Amino acid sequence: MKILITAGPTREPIDPVRYLTNRSSGKMGYEIAHAAAHAGHRVLLVSGPTSLDVPDGVDFIPVESAEEMYQAVANYLPKMDAAFFAAAVADYTPAEPSVQKIKKTGANLTLDLVRTKDILGSARSPIGFTGFLVGFAAETENLEANARLKLEKKSCDLIVANDVSRADIGFDSHENEALLVFPDRTEPFPKAPKHDLAMHLVSMLGE
Ligand code: PMT
């Protein structure tokens, strides 16, 4: 199968030296890419900036901003059979990044932010993806209910919901624990190395 995976954080520029980002290390997405390539799938990894090595045998598109990630995904997703959206994409970006470095002038500085494109929410329409669609949900409360809302709103086949208020799982940790929210049921995946969760997710695809 041909599989697209998004991973890592995005960087939203404020000025030439500053940006908005988040705590994603990219580990979860890179483990899925590694597991999928190991299982013999053709894998395209679209990743924001991380310190990780690209797994062997994986095609790679590095991106920085949410807009760049959207463009890469929109270009390649229609040709894919399955997609895993593990990236932590910024929901807001500075409305007008400054061309020059912003100087310290007043006591306060207000940034005007605008919504980014929802890449997962665009996968079915307007991008037109018809394959197996897996989103993630990074939640701090009401894990299952919030994940099920995302599943329905974005027409996913599965949402992998993780609790990002915990330090031992989720962002930048070696392990994860998740609720696998399908249209007809929810399955817990107990705390384990991200590698194991990745193998489990890839095994759902079959050959
Ligand atoms: O990278 P690690 O350090 O290993 O951490 C893993 C992780 C915590 C980042 C990962 O397991 C995870 O939860 N990824 C999703 C993070 C997130 O942005 O969740 P969300 O609930 O805000 O977004 C829901 C879904 O929409 C996600 O699949 C996200 O990739 C996608 N999204 C969000 C916003 C946006 N503009 N476009 C998107 O495609």
Image: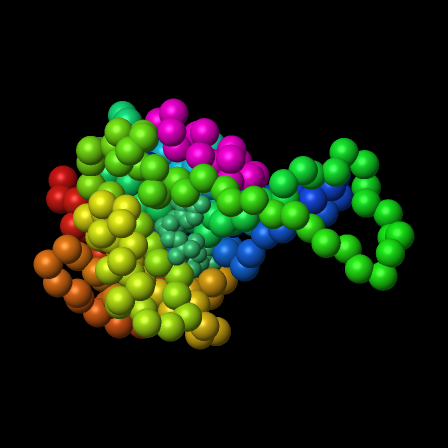
* Image coordinates for residue 130, horizontal then vertical, percent: 20, 33
Start-end of magenta stretch: 62-76
> Toward which corner of the image does residue 119 lie, by quadrant?
top left
Q: In the image, is 204 to the left or to the right of 139?
A: left
Tell me how the rendering is colored: rainbow
Residue located 85% across and 61% down the image: 107
Extreme-right residue of the structure: 105
Residue located 55% across and 39% down the image: 65
Q: In the image, is 54 to the left or to the right of 155?
A: right
**Tag count in the figure?**
0
> Toward which corner of the image does residue 55 lie, by quadrant?
top left
* Image coordinates for residue 111, horizontal then vertical, percent: 69, 50
Asked if 193 appears above or below 114 in the picture, the reply is: below
* Image coordinates for residue 60, horizontal then vertical, percent: 44, 33
Residue located 22% across and 52% down the image: 152
- The foreground one among 9 and 200 is 9
